[in-house]
Image: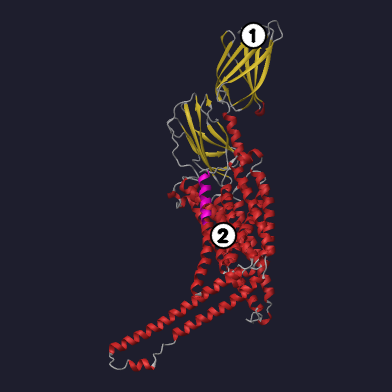
Amino acid sequence: MTQTIAPRAAATTTGGVAFRVRVLLLLLLAVIGAVLAGAAPASAHAALTGSDPQQGAVVSQAPTQVSLTFSEKVAMSDGSVRVLDPKGKRVDTGKATDLGGTTYGVKLHSGLPDGTFTVTYQVVSADSHPVSGAFTFSVGAPSQTSVALSDPAVGGGVVGALYGVGRYVSYAGFILLVGGAAFVLACWQRGAGVRPVQRLVVSGWLALTGATLALLLLRGSYVGSGKVGDIFDLTLLGQVLQTKSGAALVSRLLLLAAGALFIAVLFGAYARRDEADVTDASGKDDGSDKGGVDVDAEKRDLTFGLAIGGAVVAAGLAASWAMAEHASTGIQAGLAMPVDVLHLLAVAVWLGGLSTLLVALFRAPAETQIDAVAVRRFSRLAFGSVTVLAATGIYQSWRQVGSWSALTGTWYGQLLLIKIGLVAVLVGIAWISRRWTAQLSEAPQTKAMATAGATARATAGAKDLAELRTKQPTKVPAKSRASSSEGSDSTDSDSRDANSGGSNSGNSRRAAQLARQQAAVATARQKRLRDADPARAGLRRSVLAEAGVAVVLLAVTTVLTSTEPGRTEEAAQQATSSSSQRSGPLSLKLPFDTGGQDGKGTAEVTLDPARVGGNEMHVFVERPNGKAFDVPEVKVAFTLAAKKIGPLPVTPDRIATGHWSAIGVQIPMAGDWEIAVTVRTSDIDQTTVTKNAKIG
């Protein structure tokens, strides 16, 4: 009865672990789907903050060039900026030039017709993310245009989704690789010989390497056409290799080659030395001290070398992100890049070590079960990592957000708040894990290891017995041979041989089945003894919960790194609002008093549409009783002190009593303009009154 029930117990144990793994995978897929569905297709980190001519402007003469100003440096190539006439024909020379700072321009052909022109741009921001957009301006007067922008959104579509998945996998691989190796070296050196731990770290290396190669192939199409067919275009790949992002990806691949050597030593020579230490501790001499070699000193030297080499490789891998993305641009880039490296390493040590601890608690064999000392070491290491993570995260948040309004009013700031909440939940669960760690007892583990060793020996003996039975021929009893000799023929002889062979085969199958049942009994017994310690069982549950939250946190972080920073988004919103806040005519009333007899009144100035370019201005002069005031002269001047423009004088024409007008009043730039109105009521009595207003 026991042998029949034991396999079910083992299956239940394996099924429980598999169920938890499936839950984590489903959670991972759900989070990825949610964040990818909610993210914008084009994750622009540079924003267009100005242009000349400005969006929607009407200019009297065709410009010789169009300039665009961004919030940060961008990379441009021939064809990055296109200017199309009302019929959709290109009128630019195709070669973009750097005009200084963050302003870029493209020359236009001469003899342009009147009408509405469309400007499209597709560039790459300094933090490696694609930026695209379009705006219009008019020459003479607005007109109908046949331009239809049907190109796929840069950074979107199937290629954009694949690129986003590649970024997530690369972050996950980095965390498993760096965090798993750090956990083994700093906390649980015996884990170097545990197969599940080895598979975890190697899987991280494979994931990071595969994702980096995929990103390198996808990069050209991702920042360009967005077409799936361009993924394997070698011309685009050559262009990518000449960019900062391409250089970062190639550097990452070279560092991963060094990482492969590190893994080979860690799970090869280092693991063998650890096994030699375990053998010595058990009282058996394996010859590891032959020739007077100090094995402990040799292992310490190897540990030190692996720690230094691994730290260099890990820092280099983290720098491949820091030098090509957010930290490499914006304010204080020289400080932000090393801070970003520390931030990434802290995340990897914490979450990667957590993943390794989860594997050790659920998948490690009983004879190599992780001990309380290793768990406490990781608890201290995780606390230090969280401290570094908090300090660097506060600086990065200030740098990328910059204000409370950007923290609450932008998508980047809202994602950052979600990330902070998830980190707080993780820290809370980690505090529960520390309580279980403090209560962790090694006595049940020691008992489980001893019983597991006895069970393993019994299982090995059963297997040896099965092998012996398989090798020994089955002897037919003499009585059976005598009774079957009378009346026998060749057919009966063949039948006996077949039966003898079948009996031998059946015995072998029964012996193998017995060995499997005994192994299942041993597995069930190991699990019962391992679960006998409630602290260890509680620790496994809390670590599993931490891993689930960490999966969500990693997904949110990946989307955060591909989202426009709050500081940049807010600056772009302010620039857009300042250029479009006037949707109707501007109207100002300016009371005046020339000082002479009958010299008081009010001058009302209207400007339509009150935007950059040509405007229609009217001035209405009234007496204090509201009736039209027939004055001999009215003049108007516009001054933009912030840009040292003006005064720009305008002399309107008299239309009727108290009504003056001017057509085509040119406002060259948006800003806070000072409008000065000069009113003359007699040959010697006049005055100038001023008022500020936003135009543009």
Q: Under tag 1, what secondary structure? A: loop
Identified by mark 1, the residue type is: Arg
State whether residue 109 appears in this view.
no
The x, y position of residue 219, in whole percent, is: 50, 50
Q: Is residue 78 above or below residue 540?
A: above
Identified by mark 2, the residue type is: Leu
Q: Residue at 59% x, 62% y: name it.
A: 358
Give whichever of 201, 643 is nearer the camera.
201
Q: Mark 2 points at which residue?
A: 254
Q: Is residue 28 magenta?
A: yes
Give whichever of 375, 287 is nearer the camera.
375
Name the main secondary structure of what is drawn in magenta.
helix
State whether residue 135 appears in this view.
yes
Is 152 positioned to the left or the right of 565 in the image? left
Q: For the magenta stretch, what is the residue range?
A: 25-39
Q: Name the residue under label 1.
A: 623
The x, y position of residue 405, in whole percent, is: 64, 38
